[in-house]
Amino acid sequence: MRQLIRWSTTAAAMLLLLALALAGVLASLDNRILDWRLGLNTVPASGDTVVIQIDSKSLGEIGVWPWPRSLYASLLDKLMDAGVDDVAFDIDFSSASEPFGDALFTAALEQAGGYAWLASFAQLQADGDVAFSRPLPQFAAAADPVLVNVLLDPLTGRAHGLPIAAMDGETAIPALAVALARLDRDLPDVLEVDFSIEMAGIPRFGFTDVLYGRVDPALLSGRQVIVGASAIELRDFFTVPRYGVVPGPVLQAMALETLKSGRILTNLGLLPGFLVTLALAAALLIYRHRLKMPVVVVLLVGVSIVGEALALFAYGAAHLIVSTASLHAGLLVLLGLALADNGYHHLLARRAAQERLRYLATHDPATGLLSRQGLVDLPAEAAPRMMIVLYVQAMDEMRATLGHELVERLLAQIAHRLLHSGFPEVARTAPAGFALADRDHGDSSRLAAAARQLIRTLSGSYSVDGNRLHVDIIAGYAAGETSRGDLLNRAETAVIQARAERVAVRGFDPGDQAVMDRHRRLDRDLRQALNRNQLHLVFQPQVDLKSREIVGAETLVRWNHPELGPISPVEFISLAEETGLIVDLGRWILWEACRLATLWPSPITVAVNISPIQFQHDGFVATIEAALRRSGLPAHRLELEITESERVADPAQVRADIRHLQTLGLRVSIDDFGTGYASLSYFRELPFETVKIDQSFVRGRTTQADLDLLAAMIRLSTSLEKLTIAEGVEDAACAARLEAMGCTYGQGYYFSPPISSEELSARLLEDPHRKWG
């Protein structure tokens, strides 16, 4: 449609341009350009043509008008005596004067012997016939008539040429210039006068100056003379290109000079310029790529300059007159069309951008589904509704290992299946979450069954770019007479609880909201707690099981909320890991632990737990170095406890960081061994000194199977030359069993509960070698 508009608009513009050019609207511009072009193509006159003009001076000297024919006779005799080649009179001799003067002039013409020429005028009558104004018969018997008609441009009134002949009955009367030039060649019907000829090079003398001998005859000898009026009073004037207003005889002389120079001009008019414009317009329309406006401007200006240069060359070398105003005007029209098209393009682009923004405001660009906002903004309905939220698990790990683009294509496949699941409203509400909504039929078991069916349909293997990817999905659902936004929040709460409870499907329970409210409040308050000194550290001693002397202490963080009271570390540490606050929290714990350890009276080790998220954060190694430097704690007194986790996505980088820290003197241990992800692979992939056995394998484990498992873990670590620390030592018997199994260190309430740094310092100061437990 747009192309049709462009073509039709351009065609209409070209037709309008042609109509304006034919109507003469561009004539003024053409005249100016032609005058400039003629000035650049100046050609010298031959000097063989002389104009003897009846000027105001001559009129004043004679004193009467019309002049007696005897004056013309005397002038003709004078000129023939001077040896001129031809004399042409551009004067009307069609009416009789006093007889004596006419007789003298007839005699002079006869004496000229056929080298005198008399003007004849062709005039168009009202009935369309052509009438001639001829010299008197006695004059015509002695001198041949020549045509002195001039052709005027009907649009501008400027004289540009003259007819080479006219038929008087059966006799052809040649133009004055043609008769005097005596060329043996074919000429066009209209002789275009070459106004590039230097007019100043044509000698011009006053009538009385020649008549009274004030002009040297040598200046006339061998030349062709044209006699005519130049006085303003006689009104024989024409407006011509380049020179403006010139007398009629001078115009005839310019025509004669044109023939003498051999420059027979051909006037092509406006057609070439218009055709070039038309061709360029078609080329721009056919060209499939949209040109930038600066390129269009340069192109059009270039065509204008080249076109004018070619027209200048054509006039000078090929004797062709080309009107270029249509070209320049046409180029301006094309520029206007280009500007309009460019503006229209920008308008369409802006509209498309606005449509795109409106679309993006309510849709997910990767899947084409409704976005979270788009789902919430759907028109409200009075009927109860249900909503199922699906969460694709392990998406962060997939993005880290496979890349964002591939995971987005995977999610697009899931979205495609959801669109064919039968739900009228499908949205992507989170990077790894989808929501489906429909009317609620009041059957919760049916809703749960629908969620399970979706999990069965969507979970499993997908092929994406040659990769086989396994997807696990969990679901949460909610229903009721409330807004979509509230239903979405409830269903998402159910999903969060399903993840926490490690179940595949869970419905929303009103009690879940209180849990989520507490979760959001703790997230907000934990960020403020760092800046309000609501957090403090405690330390639980680690004891050598053989000597029962303290060798170190594990750092534990406590939060005493001003309104909610003590908050369990299990709750707020996991919350910090979810929100990413663990990086800032871990940095504070590390710096504070190093600072307090420097105050202890004994150089025991201080152990600090490091989250895998914290360990893989950029700048972690620099944070460790800064903490040691800032506190002054020797590196060998700091031990980092890394928790086993599937979040260690880049073991190679972690291994490199650990080795770098070990070169500084730090010790590294694996915390909660036996409860994490791919435990045995850590022995191969990560360099560490100590294995910390989780308390779940120690506390209350008295069956033989439990003891055998615990002993096997200790033997494995010992065989790999790793030290071991057992958590959860609650009594003397447990400590004795661990010592017998070969465990290196123990930690638990049997030796000491977590205590403040001040209390630990006091105990160490009281007896550095005291036996613990």
Image (tube, rainbow, N blue to C red):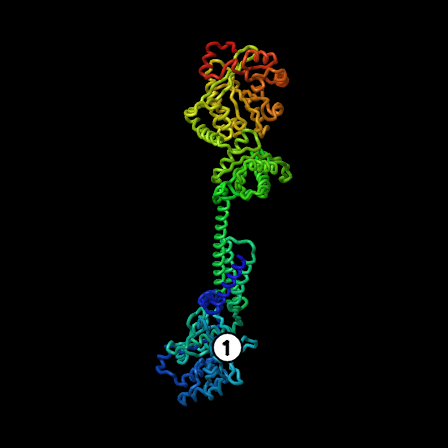
Q: Position of residue 194 (x, y in %)?
A: 49, 71
Name the residue nearer the viewer: 758 or 695: 695
Relative to 732, does residue 571 appear above or below in the rendering?
below
| Residue linked to disc 1 | 163
> The N terminus is located in which quarter?
bottom right
Name the residue nearer the viewer: 763 or 265: 763
Q: Position of residue 488 (x, y in %)?
A: 50, 38
Task: Say few, some or many: other residues with alpha carbon within 10 Å of mark 1 (under 14 / 14 to 19 / 20 or more).
Answer: some
Residue 669 lies in what quarter of the image? top right
User: How many tags in the picture?
Assistant: 1
**Disc 1 residue type (three-letter):** Pro
Q: Position of residue 220 (x, y in %)?
A: 46, 77
Look at the image and tell me whether residue 214 can be seen.
no
Name the residue nearer the viewer: 499 or 9: 499
Element class at badge 1: strand
29 horizontally vs 367: left or right: left
Look at the image and tell me whether residue 12 can be seen.
yes
Name the residue nearer the viewer: 99 or 390: 390
Q: Position of residue 106 (x, y in %)?
A: 45, 87
